[in-house]
Image (cartoon, rainbow, N blue to C red):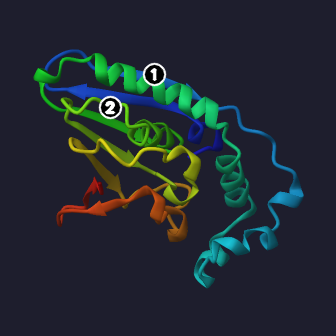
């Protein structure tokens, strides 16, 4: 996947009844100076030896770009997503939301905003999600998760597929496995 496509894409909302909806997003990514992509600057990630061998300068650049995404921009798209979810008729069945790459940050921000109505059953299908890079300050509310499920596609062929440390969830996300089918539910 090209760097441009990682930070630009579409989040789709599917329902058993009613039209499919989508949100297009595009994040401005800063150019990253060379001194921020040297291997020495990534010691805090505690990459395994095999990951270090795979960690190219392009990987390090993308990691830094994720770390520099504007939280206000993520929140703006997240608010748009929450408004669409809450404006749909809950009686038409569950809403399935699909996103990948930077779009997963928009979904996670929507989930942790605590603003999704409890009467909506929402299933988030997230692929190519670099969970470890999700900003802690966007995981604001750990309540209101009664009808929310997350399905993480761990078998993706994405830019960090050989960097397992990037896909590991940080403790502040509180996503726990609840079945053998690799579906996840939020703790809380």
Residue under the point 77% across and 39% down: 30
Mark positioned earlier in the residue sequence (2 or 1): 1
Which quarter of the rendering shows the C terminus? Answer: bottom left
Q: Which label number is shown at residue 16? A: none
Residue under the point 53% across and 70% down: 165
List x then y, in percent, for residue 167.
Answer: 48, 62
Is 2 on the left-hand or right-hand side of 121? right
Residue wearing tag 1: 80
Q: For residue 160, which quarter of the picture?
A: bottom right
SS at mark 1 in the image: helix
Residue under the point 70% across and 32% down: 28
Nearer to the camera, 36 or 81: 81
Q: For residue 18, which quarter of the picture?
A: top left
Nearer to the camera, 38 or 169: 169
List x then y, in percent, for residue 72.
Answer: 63, 31
Residue wearing tag 2: 116
Does 42 appear above or below 58?
below
List x then y, in percent, for residue 16.
Answer: 14, 26
Q: Is residue 144 visible?
A: yes
């Amino acid at each position: 996947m090209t760097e441009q496509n990682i930070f630009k894409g579409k989040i789709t909302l599917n329902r058993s009844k009613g039209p499919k909806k989508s949100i297009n997003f595009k994040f401005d990514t800063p150019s990253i100076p060379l001194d921020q992509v040297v291997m020495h600057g990534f010691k805090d990630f505690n990459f395994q030896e095999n990951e270090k061998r795979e960690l190219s300068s392009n990987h390090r650049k993308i990691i830094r770009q994720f770390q520099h995404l504007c939280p206000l921009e993520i929140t703006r798209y997240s608010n748009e997503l929450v408004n669409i979810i809450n404006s749909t008729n809950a009686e038409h069945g569950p809403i399935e939301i699909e996103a990948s790459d930077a779009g997963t940050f928009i979904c996670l921000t929507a989930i942790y905003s605590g603003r999704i109505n409890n009467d909506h059953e929402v299933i988030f299908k997230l692929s190519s999600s670099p969970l470890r890079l999700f900003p802690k300050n966007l995981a604001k509310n750990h309540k209101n998760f009664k009808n929310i499920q997350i399905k993480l596609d761990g078998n993706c062929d994405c830019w960090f597929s050989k960097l397992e440390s990037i896909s590991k969830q940080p403790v502040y996300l509180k996503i726990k496995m609840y079945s053998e089918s690799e579906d996840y539910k939020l703790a809380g």
